[in-house]
Image (cartoon, helix red, strand yellow):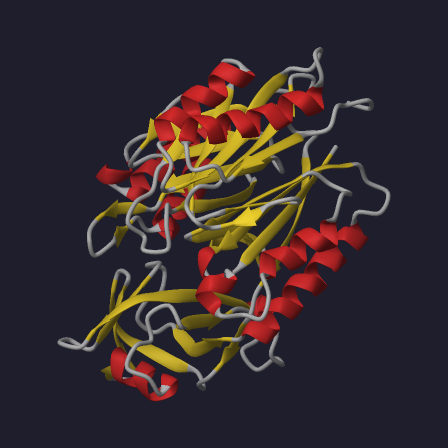
Amino acid sequence: MENHEPVRIGHSQLPDSVHAAAEAAGMILEQMGPSGKAGWALVFCGGRHDRNRILQTLRAELGDIDMIGGAAVGTITRDSLGYGGYECAVAAFPATFPTPRVIADHGLDAGEFEAGCRLGERIGDAARDGDTVLLFYDSVRGGPPPVLYIGSRLVDGIHRGLGNKTVTLIGAGTVADFHLSDSFVFDGRDVAKHAAVAVVLPSNFLSRTTIMHGCIPLSAFLEITRIDGAVLYELEGRPARDLLLEMAGTDDVSMSLTIGEKHGDPFAPYDESAYANRLILRTDPENGSATLFEADFREGTRVQIMARDNRLMLESAAKRTRELLDALQGTNPVFALYIDCAGRSRAFSGAESEEAGIVRNEIGGRIPLLGFYSGVEIAPLLGKSRPLDWTGVLTVFTV
């Protein structure tokens, strides 16, 4: 691995799926040269593409290799950023790299926790303690309105299945558009629904991750007094929707406020990295509830109503990217993966500039970069990998 070839990045925004995949693959083949060969690839594409034609074309161009990834609201590379639905981005790992172990489970619709347990057991058999594992799962179970798979149940199952084995879990719930109308994954060989796929990276692939945030507390600590799964009914004995509307000063809080749980010392000064935030998918005026993206809160949990802060989001992206790059001194970085909540895009958030653009500009040409806009981000937070909302997760892999 001392004289490894670099990871190659290809991208396209062509509306025709065959042409888009061919353009992305062509960039990779040109970079590799006539003697280069891909060993496996990460692939993400927008929801307007024909996912089967994307996969078939890439395999025809790059070879019969494992391709892992799935749907994306948009994609991010050093030279391209977009979320119009026609994006296609590929990171091809040379055949000279050690081959990862790809593990898929196609039973999300029979229970996220059970699927996670099965995945965790298989990951545990393939991984060593400390290995990094990439995880991508199909976020949208059905709809409309969108019914989502609960990432926290899947991740809890993986931790259960792992037993005493410890791995660094990084990944995302895939979504095909801002409306959460569809999702899918590439499971290594095919396009899959109701599935999750894990990539156990070779042990000499080391990862360093930073998490970009961007929310500030609007309320004091509030106790959850009634909740059922992802449906939050009451805070402090009052209908959750009523409190949210009071705080927001608007009739629609969906996707604009979050519910945040502060980890560690609750009385410590504000630190964005201490919070796990949950986006609000929708509210129900009839029963006063708010449906969250995740189902990991319980009655008795003390939370805060949080506001998304665009200025803080942009500052966090720049600061944490620089800090991570500074920490790489003396290492051999080979690839950067940026998993970005779709709500952080400029079109959705209304920010002055693209937050992902700040990340890619900071990285520049130093490290090959592939990013995509997701529904849920998964990363280590305060000692445990967990699903996150309204975050950007930047991971740099070194050898």
Please state the horizontal and vertical placement of residue 49, each as a whole percent of the image.
38, 36
The percent position of residue 310, horizontal first and vertical second, equals 55, 73
The residue drawn where x is 84% and y is 47% is: 329
317 or 267, which is in the foreground?
317
Number of numbered callouts drawn: 0
Question: Which residue is pictured at 70% across the width and 57% down the height?
Answer: 321
Residue depicted at x 28% and y 33%: 107
At x 55% / y 18%, what residue is drawn? 62
Q: Is residue 123 above or below residue 309?
A: above
Q: Which of the image's four quarters has the N terminus?
A: top right
- Residue 114, above or below 216: above
User: Residue 337: image x %, image y %?
Assistant: 61, 43
Q: Residue furthest top?
A: 35
Q: Residue furthest right?
A: 330
What quarter of the picture does the C terminus occupy?
top right
Image quadrant of residue 100? top right
Left or right: 358 with respect to 2? left
Q: Nearer the viewer, residue 114 or 348?
A: 348
**Is residue 279 shown above or below 335?**
below
The front one of 314 and 320 is: 314
Compare residues 34 and 187 and report the one nearer the observer. 34
**In this rendering, position of residue 275 left or right of residue 54:** right
Q: Kindly tell me whether residue 390 is visible in this rendering.
A: no
Residue 59 visible (yes or no): yes
